[in-house]
Amino acid sequence: MPLPVRLLIVGTGGMARYHAKNFQAMQEAIVVGGVDTDNERLMDFCSAHGIKHRFSSLEDAIAWGEFDAAANVTPDRVHYPTTMQLIANGKHVFCEKPLATNHPHANAMAAAIEDAGLVGMVNLTYRNVPALQRARELVLAGELGAIRHVEASYLQSWLTSNYWGDWRTTPAWLWRLSRSHGSAGVLGDVGIHILDFASYGIASEIENMNCRLKTFHKAEGDRIGEYLLDANDSFVMSVEFANGALGVIHATRLATGYIDDVKLRIFGDLGALEVGFGYEKPAVERVSRLRACLGDDRHTQTWTEIELEPVETNYHRFIRAIWEGATLEPSFAHAANLQRLLDRALSAEQSDPGETFVANA
């Protein structure tokens, strides 16, 4: 067995604990260091996870150099400069989503990692859903025939319920509604997830799209305190995939009754699949489900639930990719294509809340 991959975690905020937990549970990897400009957060994180080497800057960590790869868990806007610095110093990179905040940067990162012959992957976490992995296998095996039509949705309800608290009084929710506070709305928050969910599930990239975004009136003057409520609340996309299928993809924060639910329906000329990942009461954790209408069942419109097995996670795939010397999905190139679509959609959004905006790509 090859030596364990020595991993540096760059950025020690909330999501970093999942990286530490998953990589430390693997014999094939060892977390050797942490990096953060916030010294107190860095010390707390490294102490909690037994990480010996601690650095207040990426430059210091690179000067030390005793690592093979890095998990980039920095804020979105920092992904580009830190990843490019790691690539320039010969390090494999496992980057949180989105790869970058715009397509030119994402494309440059994808080109740089490929030119350097390094492994670059993006942590699109819904790849870890067993139902999605099994659906893709069935699509690739030809069980559905030619894919013709796709429906995908990401539904949240925190703007219509207090299940997670009152958004009107909570900064953690309010900033997500305000472009001046760094939000790109529901499209920027979960758009990359549902686009990836759909394209990965049917094993085909999205080539073209038309998108409509809407910001709804939610408060007097469309403002609460310092927060101007001008980020999009809902979007609807019509898309065309490389395999010729047409699809509808949508997301909203106003789907009453749905806490945080992702669904994908795939229709082929020989069968259909329905992938679900969402909360069921009691809503302790999300449940992965897959239903199929295949073969002769399509003539009687009979749906059957498919039993699912645990799947390899993104964390495991990244380490395996380093050992095998070849990038696995989700790759930088795939994430860059998703960012291209998001950029086109967001470019249509203007400053007047409540207006509907249209984009084409």
Image: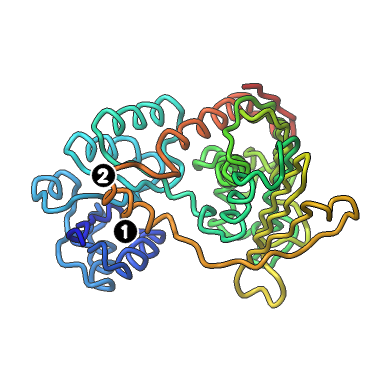
Q: Is residue 214 visible?
A: no
Q: Nearer the viewer, mark 2 or mark 1?
A: 2
Pointer 1: what residue?
A: 12
Distance between the alpha carbons at the discs numbered 2 and 1: 18 Å
* 342 relative to 86, above or below: above
Identify the residue at the far right of this view: 300
- For badge 2, the amino acid type reads His
Using the image, tell me which numbered label, if any, was put on residue 107: none
Q: Residue 293 location, x and y as percent?
A: 79, 54
Going 69% across and 53% down the picture, which residue do you hit? 263
Q: Is residue 326 visible?
A: yes
* 46 relative to 246, above or below: below
Q: Quadrant of the N terminus?
A: bottom left
Q: Residue 25 or 144: which is nearer the viewer? A: 144
Q: Quadrant of the C terminus?
A: top right
Pointer 2: what residue?
A: 92
Q: Are marks 2 and 1 in contact (CB under 8 Å)?
A: no
Label 2 element class: strand
Q: Residue 308 location, x and y as percent?
A: 61, 66
- For badge 1, the amino acid type reads Thr
Going 57% across and 48% down the picture, which residue do you hit? 176
Q: Residue 329 or 2: which is nearer the viewer? A: 2
Identify the residue at the far left of this view: 64
Q: Residue 144 or 206: which is nearer the viewer? A: 144
